[in-house]
Image (tube, helix red, strand yellow):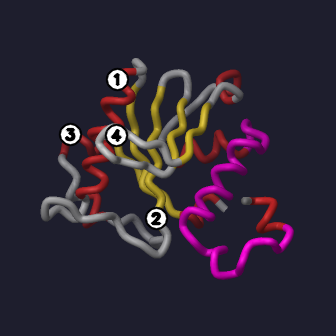
Amino acid sequence: MYQAELNGKLPSSASDREDVLTSNVFSFLKYSHRPTYLRQFLRLASLNVKTSELHRVKFEFWPNYHDGTQPDVIIETDSCYLLVEAKYFSGVAEEDGNPAGQLIREFETGTMEARNRAKSFHLLLLTDDATRPSRLLAQMPAKFQNKTSWTNWQAIG
């Protein structure tokens, strides 16, 4: 997808779509000089990864979980399972009357996946907001607060 966009093969109507942006940004992080770019991104998610570990970091795009949950990207380090929920001109899906319902479901499912791999879990919400969406994140249960981070697309670029 990245090469198609660089060579003008992607329709302009698709270039600002959330999944295309996610693919481009996280493919760059996957294939670029990891000690420079991936390490800095992981710090945005409050994760510090040793240089020796960066080449083993795995990326999984749009995995399907047994309950139908489909996060945008999973980034696995030796010890951490990072679920990234990326939003661009769209909001988090409300579920069961909770504005943060989608994040809660992803947190619960991601925690189980991390536990199955004997890794710690962390959720990163990535949005186009200029400031932290505090009201939305306040809807997350207190026990999830210290395992949830936020950043925006602008901080990555």
- Image spot of residue 31 (x, y percent): 75, 43
> Which badge, 3 or 1, comes first in the chain's sequence?
1
Quarter of the image for residue 85 reads bottom left
> Which badge, 4 or 1, comes first in the chain's sequence?
1
Q: Residues within 10 Å of mark 1 (few under 14, many from 20)?
A: some
- Stretch of the chain drawn in magenta: 7-36
Q: Residues within 10 Å of mark 3 (few under 14, many from 20)?
A: few
Q: Nearer the viewer, mark 4 or mark 1?
A: 1
Residue holding disc 3: 143
- Image spot of residue 17 (x, y percent): 57, 71
* Amino acid marked by disc 4: Lys
The residue shown at (54%, 67%) is: 18
* Distance (Cα) linking label 4 and label 1: 14 Å
- SS of the residue under disc 1: helix
Q: Is residue 83 above or below residue 112?
A: below
- Image spot of residue 122 (x, y percent): 40, 38
